[in-house]
Amino acid sequence: MSILKKVDNASYKTTIDIGASRVRQLAWYLVNIVFFKNPFNISSASKVFLLRLFGARLGSGVLIKPSVSIKYPWKFQVGDHVWIGEEVWIDNLAEVILHSNVTLSQGALLLSGSHDQARTTFDFMAFPIILEEGVWIGARSIVSGGVTCHSHSILGINSVAEKDLEPYTIYKGNPAVPVLKRVIY
C-alpha cells in the first residue's frame, strides 16, 4: 500500500540566485513601481535608459509601453527594434533574451520560474526564455521557463507555450499547438 506524501511549505527555502545586492534590488523595485508599472509614464526612452542603468543589455529602437513590469533587468537582454506592449510582465528569475524584431503584445507574461511539484519541499526552479528573431507573442499569452520560441514563430492570443515553438509556425491554445505555417510576403 502506498502512502501519499504531502507538500510541506514550511520546509521550503528559496534557492534563487538574484544576482544583485539587496540595495540594488530595493532600488530597482522602487524604479520599477514608479517608472515601469505606472500607467502615466509614457516615456519609452526613460525606461530604456533606466533598464541599461540597472544592467539590462538593450539594442536600438526598443519601445516599452506603460504598465510594464520587469523583475530583474540584470537578467534581461533585448535586441534591436523590440516592442513591449502595455501590461507585459517579464518575470525573469532566469535570463530572458529577446532577439531583434520581437513583439510582446499587451498583457503577455514571460514566466521563467516555477516549483518542483514532485518534491515535498516544493523546490524552486528557474529556466531561461529565448525569443528568437521576429517572434510575436500574442496578447495575454504566457511563455514558460525553458522555452525557446524559434525564428518568426507566433504564439496566438491567450495561449500558453510550455514547449519550444518551431520557426515560422503559428501556435494557439493551452497548451499551445501548431495551427498554421507563417508566410511573410
Image (spheres, helix red, strand yellow):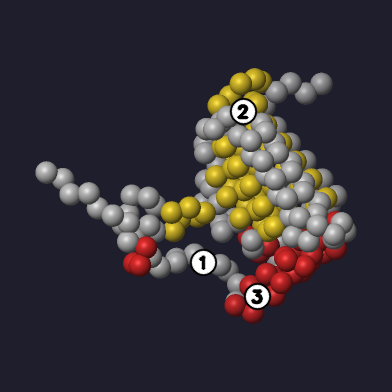
Q: Nearer the viewer, mark 1 or mark 2?
A: 2
Residues 40 and 145: in front is 40
Say which amino acid is labelled 1.
Asp
Q: Position of residue 160 (x, y in %)?
A: 57, 37
Q: Is residue 46 left or right of residue 97?
A: right
Residues 26 and 99: in front is 26
Residue at 65%, 75% in the rendered image: 26
Pointer 1 or 2: first along the chain: 1
Q: Position of residue 65 (x, y in %)?
A: 81, 51
Labels in figure, total: 3
Residue at 61%, 28% in the rendered image: 172
Say which amino acid is labelled 3.
Leu
Label disc, if present, on residue 26 of the rendered structure: 3
Residue under pointer 1: 17
Label disc, if present, on residue 171 of the rendered structure: 2
Residue at 55%, 51% in the rendered image: 112
Quarter of the image with the N terminus in it: top left
Classify mark 2: residues with Cα within 10 Å, few (<14), some (14-19) or many (20+).
many
Q: Nearer the viewer, mark 3 or mark 1?
A: 3
Residues at circles 2 and 3 in contact by the CB criterion of under 8 Å: no
Residues 128 and 32: in front is 32
Say which amino acid is labelled 2.
Tyr
Label disc, if present, on residue 72 of the rendered structure: none
Residue at 70%, 39% in the rendered image: 139
